[in-house]
Image (cartoon, rainbow, N blue to C red):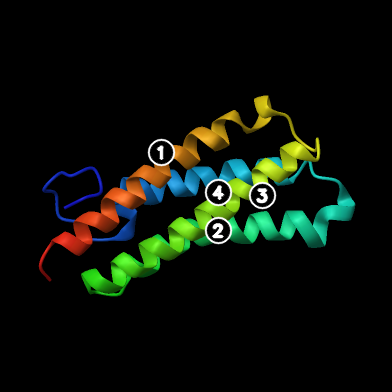
Amino acid sequence: MDDAGNSNKVRSHRDLIVWGLAMDLTVEVYKLAKVLPKDELYRLTAQVTRAVVSVPANIAEGNGRGSRREDAHFCSVAKGSLMETETLVMLMERLSYVSSQQTRVVHELIQRVSKMITSLRARLLDSPN
């Protein structure tokens, strides 16, 4: 079953819509990180890029583990990294490094990915191995 609820066989994490959206989110956050001040390179820039990369990476790792329980665990880790990313993007706005206009797409993707991870995790835990 893919993360959209279809009965299509998931052969790889690349078949998951949520993974693709998490990759899109990663690209958008990297674009935002490019406009941060240079003195944030080893602080906020490094932190937000590490956090956002962790989202699709953990979705992929969980999918590759071979058990629903482990997959669900890595969905939880991905969700935590997603919330960390959201917090750091909000901090970037509060520090006036970026505007809410610049972060609109990022926040929309965060909402979509969050809902999809929650749904995927619930289905993984509700289904027998």
Q: Label 2 vs label 1: CA separation?
A: 16 Å
Q: Where is 47 relative to 61, above or below?
A: above
Q: Which residue is mark 2?
A: 53
Q: Label 3 vs label 4: CA separation?
A: 13 Å
Q: Secondary structure at mark 4?
A: helix
Q: Position of residue 50 (x, y in %)?
A: 62, 61
Name which residue type carries label 3: Leu
Q: Label 1 vs label 4: CA separation?
A: 13 Å
What is the number of the mark on residue 88?
3
Q: Where is 73 relative to 120, above or below?
A: below
Q: Where is 41 relative to 37, above or below?
A: below
- Disc 1 or disc 4, which is closer to the eye? 1
Instruction: Looking at the picture, tell me which residue is in the foreground, 126 or 42.
Output: 126
Instruction: Looking at the picture, tell me which residue is in the foreground, 115 or 2.
Output: 115
What is the number of the mark on residue 26?
4
Q: Position of residue 96 (x, y in %)?
A: 80, 35
- Disc 3 or disc 4, which is closer to the eye? 3
Q: Could you say which quadrant of the image residue 64 lies in?
A: bottom left
